[in-house]
Each structure stands twice: as C-alpha cells, then as structure tokens.
Amino acid sequence: MVQTNAQRKSLGLPVLARNALLMRAAQIQADQMAASDTFEHQLPGAAYPNLESRISAVHYVHSTAAENIAEGYSSAAAVVAGWMTSPGHRANIVSTAFTEMGAGAATSKNGHRYHVQVFARPR
C-alpha cells in the first residue's frame, strides 16, 4: 500500500484508502495462486475463480474494480516498481476511477511468491 500510494503521490494523484475487505479479497487470490502454484487472474476450479467472486465473497459492494498480480518479487517495493513498468498494471495503480485498495501475498510450497492488489470504488 505504502509503495503504491507513494507512486500516486509522486504523480500528484490522491492516495488510495486501505480497505479491510479488499485486503481479504487480495489475500484470497494470493492464497489460491500459492496453493495451486498457478499465476493467473482466472483460476477455474478454485473456490473463488475470478475477481468478482472474490469481491462478492468478502461482501464488498463496488461500482468498479481491478486486480494486479505478480509472481517472484521479494518485496513490496520491487513488485510495485515492476508493475509501474507494465502499462496495464500501471494503469490500475494510477487510475482515478479507484478510491480504495487491498493487497495480499503468499508463498507456495516450492517457494514461489505471489502478490495481489485489488483496486475498487465503493458503490
């Protein structure tokens, strides 16, 4: 969160509020990817196979939402730096459509580190 908001501040954008429900939704995806050792936004066969199902599971009512995922980074600073070099991920980080976010991370049994950000605007 800190790294993401630092990027937004440096661009003159408002910071995103930390939301506990979005933190849970992000952690669900990090845990699912680590458990299956699969790096994907969509996880067919998982309890919560897509972003909408994860957001619904935590009872967050939103008007818009998006998700960033990453694999293999060792720190929050490194993963956010990586996302900032990717046009799609950067677009989520700097979008003014979102006002809140959550983040999660998990490590698979074989040591792969998975990171997730969920961005949203409440309804």
Image (cartoon, grey):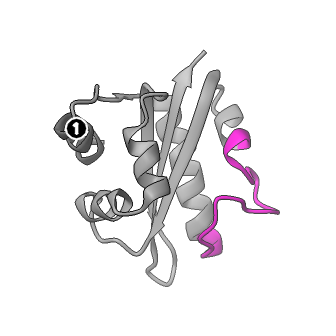
Horizontal arrangement in the rendering, residue 94 relative to residue 48 (left or right): left
Q: Residue furthest top?
A: 123
* Residue 18 seen: yes
The residue to which callout 1 is attached is: 11
Horizontal arrangement in the rendering, residue 16 relative to residue 8 (left or right): right
The disc labelled 1 sits on which kind of residue?
Leu
Q: In the picture, which quadrant includes the C terminus?
A: top right
Magenta-tinted stretch: 35-53
* Residue 19 seen: no
Tell me which residue sits at (40%, 51%) in the image. 90
Tell me which residue sits at (44%, 46%) in the image. 91
87 over 59 or under it: above or below: below
Q: Main secondary structure of the magenta part?
A: loop
Quarter occupied by residue 1: top left
Is disc 1 placed on a helix, strand or loop?
loop
Quarter occupied by residue 86: bottom left
What number of labels is visible? Answer: 1
